[in-house]
Image: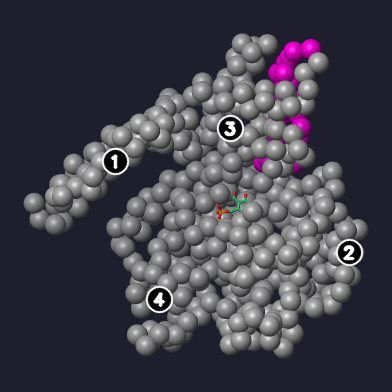
Amino acid sequence: MTHSQDSVAALNRAFVHARAHIEGLGSAPVGATVGADELRARLGGALPEHGSPPVEVVDALVAATAGGHLGSAGGRFFAWVIGGSLSSALAADWLTSTWDQNAALHACGPAAAVVEEVAGRWLIDLLGLPDEASFAFTTGCQLAHFTCLAAAREAVLRTAGWDVNRDGLFDAPRIRVIVSELRHASVDRALRFLGFGQKSLTVLPTAADGAVDRAAFHSALGGGPGPTIVVLDAADLSVGAFDAFEELIPSAKRSGAWVHVDGAFGLIARASRSMRHLLTGVELADSWATDAHKWLNVPFDSGFAAIRDRAAHRASMTVNASYITPGESVRDQIDWNPEWSRRARGFAVYAALRELGRTGIEDLVDRSCLHARDLVSGIGGLPGAQVLWPPTLNQGLIRFLDPRPGASEEDHDRWTDGVIREINETGEAFFSGTAWRGRRAMRVSVINWRTTAGDVARAVEAARRVLRRAA
Ligand SMILES: Cc1ncc(COP(=O)(O)O)c(C=O)c1O
C-alpha cells in the first residue's frame, strides 16, 4: 500500500466505527460497562517491538476500548457539564486532524489563522462583548482563565508601576483576588499557575440564590487600596447561579479592580432572549472565559478567552524567537495564546456557529433549559425524591431520601449516592453527584444538542423504576 492508501484505509475504518458509535447512542448503555482493570488488561502489555498496519491498529483500538466510553455524545447524558458535538463541528474536527495545521502562526496555517479571526469576532458578537476585545481559542475554560488572569496580572501591576514581564513577581506589589465561595476550582488553579497562593484570595460568601453576597462584596472592595482582581461567576457549576454583574462590576471598576468572569457555560445564555436578563451588565467586565466544548457543542479541546485590554493581553502572551517572522497585517495566534504549537481549534468552532447560526444557538439554550426543568420536575416529583434546586438555567439538584424511619441527613447522603449509582447502572441515563450546602445531591445538567423530550421521558422512567425498587 502507498502512504495515502494506508491513510484512506484507516480513515474508512474510523468512519465505520464512528458511524456505529453514533447510531448506537440511542440503544447502548450510557455509562461504561467495563472497569479500569479490564481496560488495562486489554490495552496494556509491553510496548510493541514492531509496528502494525494502520487499519489493524484502528480496529484493535476500537475493540480494546469497547464499553469503556461514556455515552456523553448522546442525549441521555446529564452528568457534570459535558456538551456533545454538533454534526458539522465533529466533521470539521476530523478535517482539522487531516489538515494537521500548526495554528501557532499565520505562516504555518493561513486558513487556520483566518478562521480563528472570523470565529473569534463572531463569538464576541454572539456573547455581546465589547467590539474592541481581543480573544484566544484555548484548550478549555481552564486555560481561558489562565490567559485572562495573566492579562489581569500584567494590567493591575502595570497600573501600580510594576512591569511583571521584566521584573517578575518577587517584590511586586501584592495583588488581592476577590472570589466567590462557589467559584470553580479551575480559577484557583489558573491563579496558582500565575504565582498566586491561597493567601491572595478573599473568599466571599454567597446568598441563598448562590450569587455572591453583595454586602460582603462591597465591604471586601473597601478593604484597602492596591492592585485587585475580582472573579465573578456567570453560572456556577452546581445551580447555574449568576452574580449581580450590573451592580458589582461598576463598583469594582470604580475602585480600580480588574473584573474577570467565569462563564464556562453560562456566558452562552447571552444568545437567548429569554435567559439574557440573568447576565445583564456582564459586558462591563474586563475579561471573560468560556467554553465552546460545553454549550456550543464543539468537540473537546475548545475554550475561549476574551479580553477588553488588548495591550495587556498581548503583552502577557506574545513571544519572540529567532525563527518567528511576525506576520504583517495578519493575526498570529501565538501573540494571544499560552501555547506554542497548537491544534487549529477555530475550524470546529466556525462550523458550529455556521451550523446553528444565532437563532439555532438560542434554540439550543432554550431547549436545554426546558429539558432541565422537565427532568428535575419529573424525577423530583417521584416518591422518595426531593427537589433541592429547580433549574433557573440548565442545572438542577435532586436529593433522594432514605425511607427508613428516623433516617439522618447522613443516611440521605448515602441513599442519594446509591440511587444515582443505580440509575446509572440501568444504562438508560447518566448523572453525577455533588455536595450542595454540605448535602449530597444528584446534579441534572442538560447541555447536549441531541437531548429530546423522549430522552427526558426515558431518564424519568429509569429513575421511577429505581426508586420503586428501593422503596
Ligand atoms: C463553571 C466552570 N468553570 C470552569 C470550568 C473548567 O472548564 P474546562 O474543563 O473547559 O477547563 C468548568 C468545567 O466544568 C465549569 O463548570
Q: Amino acid at mark 4?
A: Leu
Find the distance from the CA under tag 4 to the CA under tag 3.
Answer: 41 Å
Q: Position of 52 compared to 388: left or right?
A: left
Reading the chain from its start, which is encountered first: label 4 or label 2? 4
**Which residue is depicted at the point 58% across and 32% down?**
431
Mark sitting on residue 431: 3
Q: Amino acid at mark 3?
A: Phe
At label 1, counting other C-alpha atoms closer than 10 Å, the crowd grade (few under 14, some 14-19, many 20 or more) is: few
Find the distance from the CA under tag 1 to the CA under tag 4.
Answer: 37 Å
Find the distance from the CA under tag 4 to the CA under tag 2.
Answer: 43 Å
Numbered range of the magenta stretch: 379-405
- Pointer 2 residue: 218
Reading the chain from its start, which is encountered first: label 1 or label 4? 1
The verdict on residue 394 being magenta is yes
- Pointer 1 residue: 44
x and y percentages locating residue 37 in the rendered image? 38, 33
Mark sitting on residue 105: 4
Q: Position of 41 compared to 295: left or right?
A: left
Q: Is residue 161 above or below residue 292?
A: below
At label 2, counting other C-alpha atoms closer than 10 Å, the crowd grade (few under 14, some 14-19, many 20 or more) is: few
